[in-house]
Image: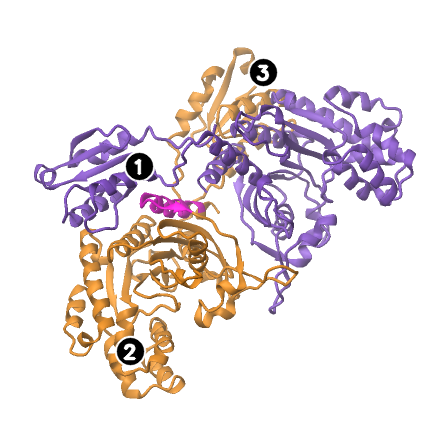
Chain colours: A orange, B purple
Amino acid sequence: MAVREKVFDVIISCFKRHGAEVIDTPVFELKETLTGKYGEDSKLIYDLKDQGGELLALRYDLTVPFARYLAMNKLTNIKRYHIAKVYRRDNPAMTRGRYREFYQCDFDIAGQFDPMIPDAECLKIICEILSTLQLGDFQIKVNDRRILDGMFNVCGVPDSKFRTICSSVDKLDKMSWEDVKNEMVEEKGLAPEVADHIGAYVKQHGGVSLVEQLLQDPKLSQNKQAQEGLRDLKLLFEYLTLFGITEKISFDLSLARGLDYYTGVIYEAVLLQTTARQGEEPLGVGSVAAGGRYDGLVGMFDPKGRKVPCVGLSVGVERIFSIVEQRMEASEEKVRTTETQVLVAAAQKKLLEERLKLVAELWDRGIKAELLYKKNPKLLTQLQYCEETGIPLVAIIGEQELKDGVVKLRSVASREEVDVRKENLVEEIRRRTSQHPLHLLN
Amino acid sequence: MAVREKVFDVIISCFKRHGAEVIDTPVFELKETLTGKYGEDSKLIYDLKDQGGELLALRYDLTVPFARYLAMNKLTNIKRYHIAKVYRRDNPAMTRGRYREFYQCDFDIAGQFDPMIPDAECLKIICEILSTLQLGDFQIKVNDRRILDGMFNVCGVPDSKFRTICSSVDKLDKMSWEDVKNEMVEEKGLAPEVADHIGAYVKQHGGVSLVEQLLQDPKLSQNKQAQEGLRDLKLLFEYLTLFGITEKISFDLSLARGLDYYTGVIYEAVLLQTTARQGEEPLGVGSVAAGGRYDGLVGMFDPKGRKVPCVGLSVGVERIFSIVEQRMEASEEKVRTTETQVLVAAAQKKLLEERLKLVAELWDRGIKAELLYKKNPKLLTQLQYCEETGIPLVAIIGEQELKDGVVKLRSVASREEVDVRKENLVEEIRRRTSQHPLHLLN
């Protein structure tokens, strides 16, 4: 949890830096809200038992609840973040940070705006978060559903097979082209030459020059959807240049994304293995953030079908936790799980009352303080507790100190002790611990 | 959510000040984990549908999952807090902050310690939180399950009826003694004179002097359990005196608490109506925090029945949200939902590129900044956005400013504008907004 809180801090700071407010939605939704939104993965939805009342299911992601929330509250314009757990009846894979209950960190911009400005900001946010977390080098693959659909069209894929062929393309990060082609031809009944035609496109990736090249492509240039997608990508690259992040972006025609609801630009950030540090067990390369534009989803929840264009991103924070944890285990860095500044200790017996009075005084002045819940703990036990839990200071009282109106303030690390007048104690503790920020990352 | 986050901040700061670490548990537990822990309220548990695999149910509180977690991980010693949602299939009452899904904020101390030191700290924590939140005057009722059981025993209640008679006593905060007596006699089959005997006890409340008086009570003084409870309460009062909070504490023999698992001291904090401010709709007096000692619960989850004594508290934060929200509505105080420090705006058309460059620079330097997602927004529109959302500063660029290497920094409140050299902009924004803490409470 200490690691998690640190990672969340980075992500929340970034979301707030970009002016987002925070919302919350219930952990369960009406079952019908989730039906038909997730394609093949719908079987992974957890249902609640019918105990009377509405039929409910645990949320599968934060995007569909967000769209439902916008439609219900008739909101046409919001920039919000939402950090919460989602639920999938999947096979867990602990080392890869894949669980049945896991956090998503979502940031979305809803509203009718000029093209690609919010989309560019989403990519900027992913860059800021991954850079700040120092997870090593990363790349953000970008594509557009309209380019994919246009490409399927010019390659001769029948309209009815767009989504299922899109699913096959989506597997290219885990399977070879030969296997994907095989799936397209054998399982999904595509003509081999159509598959090859797709293959020639999806092998391509590059920067804005590839966008320009495809704008001149004899076939794609004849397709309206592809043209729109490519023209928007070109504009996106202009904005990304102004944001100074084009070096992290790769236009990749093989990026398809599994979910049904995307309608425009899509993106996925992957960590690159090359920077694996020494002593670290390498984790499988994987997506750590992803998102895209979904202009049709809110309309599905509105009685009149009124659309609210949306674009957003989701940070896959469980994988990031795994990576940060492994890095810390490797570095043998000790993580404090509390923030206690000082332990109130006694050097002799029969000083429980004095300890209680002092610790209450410190609490009331805002100092993070503890005492051992023993009437007469040994001084050594009290010092060991500090060593174990990382408490940096000990405020020791004894009969002499009480007589002199002082407290012996001991630094656990250096073992130095000085007498501090009681009225100066709070200030001295603050002074000494203000230089102790938790630095769990890197 | 802005209100919630502020309330959570107060609570979390307090929990950390007392040296607690944070844990997390899944939203669902094995159904069998929850069975038999909540008495009459078990019918309110949400079950998950049996889709294969384990039988699961949504957590009903955070205490039982905590005890399960301690037993599973063989922990005998921890001070933790946990803030999360719990689930009850109950009739919601929105105005009283009673929902089916709601937050609990729990702080617990597990471990074998000298008597009443952790218990006293729990009461201190409740006092600190309620005082900091400035919810008006409050009182913490304190009792002990052993005193209740001893009292039932000396009054002649059969052992088998202790828990159900305890439930009746628990209703005294909502029902008159006559109605409670009626329930005891008519529904639960108690002899009227036994009920009257109980009545004579449960009408009593007071301070440490009542404890001392009952220690001399001819009947209670003969009961071992009651004696233990009373002796511990006397010690508790000593510690509460050292903490300086006895004026908030009332030893109240009618306090029973509904849950089965308490074994020792129990407490419940209620807000007192007398301080309702002008213009506020008075809310029903209610418990806003409660807790107690449960020394047997962890043992129920340990294969060998090994006990881990625990004491804790839970803050009923939904009621607090209701109160703070109503107070703010009454005061017409405007709550900001974002923390944006500055809007990057343009005074003329065709400056989108310059705006994007400047906003990215501010983000990269850690400034919370926004821009409107329009190519050529009007200056007035941009200023209005700041007024609506409470953004205090506008960084305006125009052709002249670009030429001069400055940015016009405008204070939204005072409408004053000054030219700031671009290289000093970040510092100037920081300087001007460091005095803008969110002060949502009070």
Q: Is residue B41 left or right of residue A347?
A: right
Task: Identify the residue at image location x=74%, y=45%.
Answer: B260
- Identify the disc placed on residue B387: 1
Report the amino acid beneath label 1. Answer: Glu
Numbered disc 2: what chain? A
Tell me the residue at 85%/44% (across/down): B161
Question: Which residue type does callout 2 highlight?
Answer: Phe
- Front disc: 3 or 2: 2
Residue at 20% across, 35% down: B425
Q: In which quarter of the image is residue A266?
A: bottom left
Residue neighbourhood size for the residue with mark 3, other residues' Cα within 10 Å, grouped as few (<14), some (14–19), many (≥20): some
* Farthest-out residue, top: A404
Query: Which residue carries the number 2 mark?
Result: A152
Which quadrant would residue B52 be assigned to in this image? bottom right
Residue B118, position as x, y percentages in the image: 63, 32
Instruction: Report the magenta residues as a range.
Output: A5-22
Q: Badge 2, how many Cα within 10 Å: few under 14, some, many 20+?
A: many
Residue that carries the numbered disc 3 in the rendered image: A399
**Closer to the camera: disc 1 or disc 3?**
1
Spatial CA distance of label 1 from label 3 is: 61 Å
Q: Is residue B79 visible?
A: no
